[in-house]
Amino acid sequence: MIYPSQAVRIVIATKPVDFRKGHDGLAALLERELDLDPHSGIIVVFRAKRGDRIKVLLWDGSGLVLCYKRLGQGKFAWPKVQDGLMRLSKG
């Protein structure tokens, strides 16, 4: 099981990414373009251009975990597409 810590940070990469990227490509994108450490325990949500797919990247303490979700119908509700990140907080 994967259990994030209570103090986990979740960020949403608001700019669509190339969904051919895997673990290493998304981790490199985090370091290069977003100035984040993929091994710091954050959870990062990436979106596809069409808005119907997401990839979630996280470090579980022993390796990178990549989850993928594609909707059968419809699209995810997204913030305005722009460069940068959206940070989620409680409440």
Image (cartoon, rainbow, N blue to C red):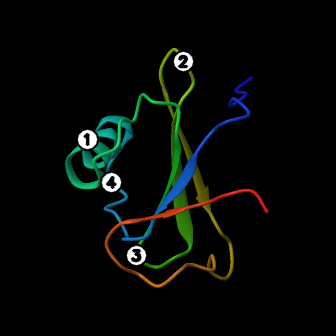
Q: According to the image, label 2 marks what residue?
A: 61
Q: Please tell me which residue is depicted at 75% across the width and 56% down the height of the picture.
A: 90
Please determine whether, in this image, residue 36 is positioned above or below residue 13.
above
* Label of residue 20 in the image: 4
In-front residue for pair 77/91: 91
User: Foreground: 23 or 6?
Assistant: 6
Categorize mark 4 by other alpha carbons within 10 Å: few (<14), some (14-19), many (20+). few
Q: Is residue 7 left or right of residue 20?
A: right
- Tell me, yes or no, whether the two marked residues, 2 and 4, touch with CB atoms within 8 Å: no
- The first of marks 4 and 1 along the sequence is 4
Residue in the image at 32% along x and 49% along y = 21
Q: CA distance from mark 4 to mark 1?
A: 14 Å
The image's mark for residue 19 is none
Nearer to us: label 4 or label 1: 1
Of residue 86 and residue 74, the one placed in the foreground of this image is 86
Query: Which callout, 3 or 1, points at the residue further toward the start of the chain?
Result: 1
**How far separated are the C-alphas under marks 3 and 1?**
19 Å
Quick one: quadrant of the C terminus? Answer: bottom right
Relative to 74, 21 lies left or right: left
Residue 27, compared with residue 76, is above or below; it is: above
Nearer the N terminus, badge 3 or badge 4? 4
- Which amino acid is tagged 3? Lys
Q: CA distance from mark 3 to mark 4?
A: 12 Å
Closer to viewer: mark 2 or mark 3? 2
- Residue identified by numbered label 3: 49
Q: Secondary structure at mark 3?
A: loop
Quarter holding the N terminus is: top right
Q: Check disc 1: other Cα within 10 Å, few if <14, some if 14-19, many if 20+.
A: some
Please give the residue where the numbered disc 1 appears in the rendered image: 28
Q: Nearer the viewer, mark 3 or mark 4?
A: 3
Helix, strand or loop at mark 2: loop
